[in-house]
Amino acid sequence: MSIMDEVKKEGVVIARKGDWQVWWHYIVPVFWAIAGLLFPREKKNFEERAIINLGKHIYFNDPDHVNANLPRYRPTFVHELVHIKDNKRRPLFYKITYVLSKKWRCYWEFRAYSQEMVFRYKDGEIPPDYIDFLVEVFRDSFYFKMHDNIRPAFERVADLASNGKISLFEFPEEFEVIAKEEIFS
């Protein structure tokens, strides 16, 4: 199944800046504005990189991100689909813990970035320094400095992916063990 098929199956609504039609879509630019005020050094980063999902809506600040058929954007859609599926599975718990708990936000992002990694292994395009990139993502202020040493967790997931023990949009028990040991301990 292609990523766009999965997007359609989940009923995802893709919204670009300027396409927003209902009042609550405007929460997104308010979030970006607040983030820019709280983290002025990261403002440009938020404006260029930020993608937010609320419910089954994915909001892109950069219109080029919208095309999931372009290979470079497929991992982004995989990442956001994981968040949408997690939100669908446990809607209230997901929203509350993502916003109010650093460890839980780390867990939710770990799930999404792990699936990006699985997708990249499946597509055969994982860059050698990808885990280094993920470690920095979890350390920098873009995600409010979620975790200082997430490397062992991603190395263990990379091992699962390279051995075919984890599939796209599936989280085996081994994955949950990694998350508990590396994030919640």
Image (cartoon, rainbow, N blue to C red):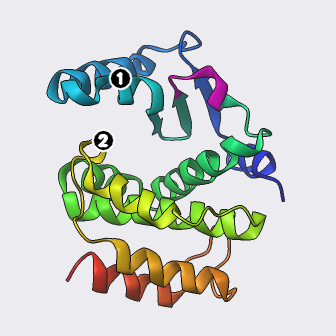
Image point (27%, 75%), residue name: 183
Question: Magenta stretch: residue 61 in it?
Answer: yes
Rendering quarter of residue 52: top left
Q: Mark number for residue 44?
A: 1
Dot 2: few (<14), some (14–19), or many (≥20) neighbours within 10 Å?
some
Left or right position of 45 against 169 = left
Using the image, tell me which numbered label, if any, was put on residue 62: none
Q: CA distance from mark 2 to mark 1?
A: 11 Å
Q: Earlier in the sequence, mark 2 or mark 1?
A: 1
Q: Is residue 179 left or right of residue 13?
A: left
Q: Is 95 placed above or below 148 here?
A: above
The percent position of residue 144, horizontal first and vertical second, equals 22, 47
Amino acid type of the residue that numbered disc 1 sits on in the rendered structure: Lys
Task: Kindly identify the residue that appears in the image at 34 percent across and 56 percent down.
Answer: 136
Residue kind at label 2, given as amino acid type: Phe
Compared to residue 123, the image places residue 54 above or below, namely: above
Most extreme residue toward the front is 128
Residue corresponding to mark 2: 142
Task: Please state the horizontal and vertical placement of residue 129, each as a whole percent of the image.
Answer: 51, 63
Bounds of the magenta span? 60-65
